[in-house]
Amino acid sequence: MTDLLHPWEGEKRVEMPRTREELPLYDVSLTKFLLLFVFSLGLYQFYWGYRQWRCIRNAGNGVLPIVRAFFLPLFLYAQIRHTQEIFARHGHPERIAALPLAITFFLLALSIRFVPVPFDLLPFLGSALPLLLFQQRINAFHRKIAPQIPSNHLIGFRHLAIVGVGGFLLFVNYCTISEPLIRGDALSKKIHDHFLEAGFLQPEEEIIYLYADGLFSIEGRGLFFTERRLVRYLASGEKEGPRILSLPYDDIVDLSLQGAIRPTEDSILYLKTTSGYTYMFDLPVAQEIDKRFYRELRDAWVRARRMAPSTPSRSPRIDP
């Protein structure tokens, strides 16, 4: 194995490649790299790392490509230094800023775990930049030693499949509601004013917790409660108008939560009213949304029942 800190400069030159398979390193165009990196949600970097480490092993280095690729952020520095050895072995010695590229990639890859959605998209895209700069040097090296071999830029069916699946997952992750359970004081003024205008919320009320079960927006469909009542809202089309189910706390006799049997199922919130009717609402178990919503709702209901004077029962109001 060559010394990592002293690249081997070999006494004899190797034969120049004639086909892409004979290139000393993995060749891929920058556009194709970035496309597959983004739409594979970053998984392409591990395949790319494996291909590069396999070429390094074929050059006579005793490494395990799968292990090195899996821990790519830790081994990128070594990968760049081994690549420099291969450059020199083919008569094109040049220096690459191995340490800055490796540190930048490591910090950006690590920061993705600590940045909330959707801002984690910035370090995710940024982490591709050091790899792109590195691949650019590899491609330039290949054009020097084998200018007759075209760049690997073609997009095949499997690449399109990755783009399609990855594009859908990116859309779901960044264009749909990422945090469906929201504290009332965390709602924006725009949403608060929209609820007032639509009649979901009364001017003297403040939302304690809101669960949005719409796909794309909080305003579309959801369930929230105030210190006075529980409200189920649905923003229909313009002709039908919004639909509202309002359940004042003094009309609720009891409430309970039936937990989901399987992780893929929802829990069911039961509300028994003075009229004898029982309402059911689905709550997801993810992030313990069901338990958190139920616990806060029950506390608000208990407080309201203790403070409210005895009044004749009313039927729940449903606005068409």
Image: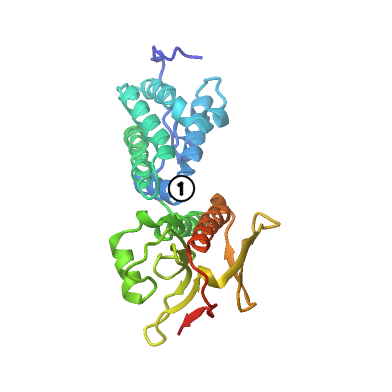
10 Å crowding of disc 1: few (<14), some (14-19), many (20+): some
Looking at the rendered structure, the kind of residue marked 1 is: Leu
Image x and y of residue 82, in percent: 43, 22
Image x and y of residue 291, in percent: 58, 53
Q: Secondary structure at mark 1?
A: loop
Image: 98 above or below 37: above
Which residue of the protein is positioned furthest toward the right in this rendering? 261
Question: 205 left or right of 52?
Answer: left
Which residue of the protein is positioned furthest toward the front in this rendering? 309
Image x and y of residue 94, in percent: 30, 23
Q: Which sits in the foreground, 42 or 204?
A: 204
Point 40% across, 30% down: residue: 106
- Quadrant of image for the C terminus: bottom left
Query: Which quarter of the picture shows residue 227?
Result: bottom left
Point 35% across, 48% down: residue: 31
Q: Which sits in the foreground, 283 or 76?
A: 283
Question: 289 left or right of 112?
Answer: right
- Label 1: which residue? 41
Asked whether residue 278 is in view, the answer is yes
Q: Give the total of numbered labels.
A: 1
Q: Which sits in the foreground, 270 or 16?
A: 270
Image: 294 above or below 313: above
Image: 217 above or below 35: below
Image: 118 above or below 239: above
Q: Which sits in the foreground, 240 or 43?
A: 240
Point 49% across, 62% down: residue: 304
Indicate how the structure is coloured in the image. Answer: rainbow
Asked whether residue 270 is in view, the answer is no
Point 71% across, 57% down: residue: 261
Image x and y of residue 265, in percent: 65, 60
